[in-house]
Amino acid sequence: MKKATFLALVAMVFSLSLNALTLGKLGNFKFEKVNKYVWIMHGPPENPSVENEGFMNNPSFVEGKNGTIVIDPGGNYNVGKKIVAEYKKATNKPVLAILNTHKHGDHWFAGKAFAEAYPNAQSYAHPNMIKAAKDGDARLWYNILEGLSKNLKGTDGPFPFPTKVLKDGDILKVDGHTFKIFHPERAHTDTDILIEHVESNVLWLGDNLMDCRLGGMDESSSVYGNIELLEDIINQRNGYRKYDLYVPGHGPSNEMHKVIDPFLNYFKTVLKWAKKAYKDGKESYEVKANVAAELKDYQSWDEFDRQMGKHLMKAFSEVEAKDF
Ligand SMILES: [Zn+2]
């Protein structure tokens, strides 16, 4: 090989590695092909930080003949540009559609970078998601994520609000691919959609399922609803089938029981102790140590210390409300 060619090659490899999505000590992230049509970039499951640049979800895409359908593009505009760069290494096809699982900005804010690269892409979400995002949740999440990652600049003005709606039972066809939409009334939030890709038999659950991490629940969430939903999925009720792969909102994808059972068991344990506290006339914090002891295997999950007590309080208030 001529010296000039060799140097050009070195320069090219070097510039490619510079463009890789490398997040501090967390390593390199790229889209990986999990079956004939589906690619997933599993982000780090830790809370947004300066180190992870606010990237911690699982952006995915389904590859059609002429273009792709992206699911949950990522957490902000700036890291989104790096996710788009990774996307372009995986395929040279344009993005035709973006499907957003729920209102939390760590999942949909990078839609801005995708829209910039692919202006014809249509962005979809449940109507509750679009309304909540516009009514203040986009700004709320901008502030939360900016506080943690300092990387949100450019994500607003305007936010990449979805414009097309998806409702429970809808079948969306794009480029020969079929997506079946589920909307649980109240689970992780009241804005969620779960997405079945029929041709590859994969289910995206958004934040109704997490692995290796716990996330916040708000006034639109329901511990009861989240448990019921995961039990419906495991028991293949309400239209859910048996899937080859289950994709959580955060953490690694896996087969059904391996990825759903730990998270379901977590919430069931929290609810069990909330019920016991209520029955015994105690406050939720009085059983917190019991819950922590029973869930000691979950201590390594990101945010366990901060979220478990809040989930217990939330479950307690739901138990209380059911009694009235
Ligand atoms: Zn969420």
Image (spheres, rainbow, N blue to C red):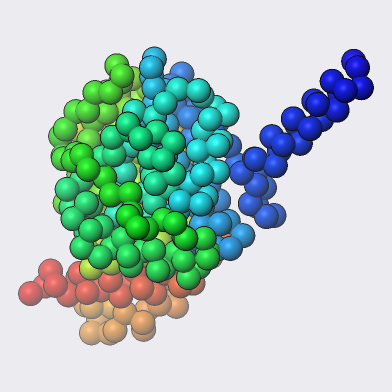
**Can you say whether 171 is above or below 272 in the image?**
above
Q: Residue at x 70, y 42 (%)?
A: 18
181 or 300: which is nearer to us?
181
**Can you say whether 4 is above or below 103 in the image?**
above
Q: Residue at x 22, y 74 (%)?
A: 317
Q: Which of the image's four quarters has the C terminus?
A: bottom left
Q: Residue at x 28, y 71 (%)?
A: 314
Q: Which of the image's four quarters has the N terminus?
A: top right
Rendering coords of residue 271 (x, y %): 29, 65
Q: Can residue 204 be seen in the rendering of this structure?
A: yes
39 or 250: which is nearer to us?
39
Q: Residue at x 39, y 46 (%)?
A: 112
> Which residue is most to the left?
324
- Res 215 → quadrant: bottom left
Rendering coords of residue 158 (x, y %): 32, 55
**Can you say whether 62 is above or below 133 in the image?**
above
Q: Can residue 41 be seen in the rendering of this structure?
A: no
- Res 307 → quadrant: bottom left
Rendering coords of residue 32 (x, y %): 55, 31
**What is the tally of numbered marks visible in this picture?**
0
Rendering coords of residue 231 (x, y %): 27, 46
184 or 73: which is nearer to us?
73
Q: Is residue 122 left or right of residue 266?
A: left
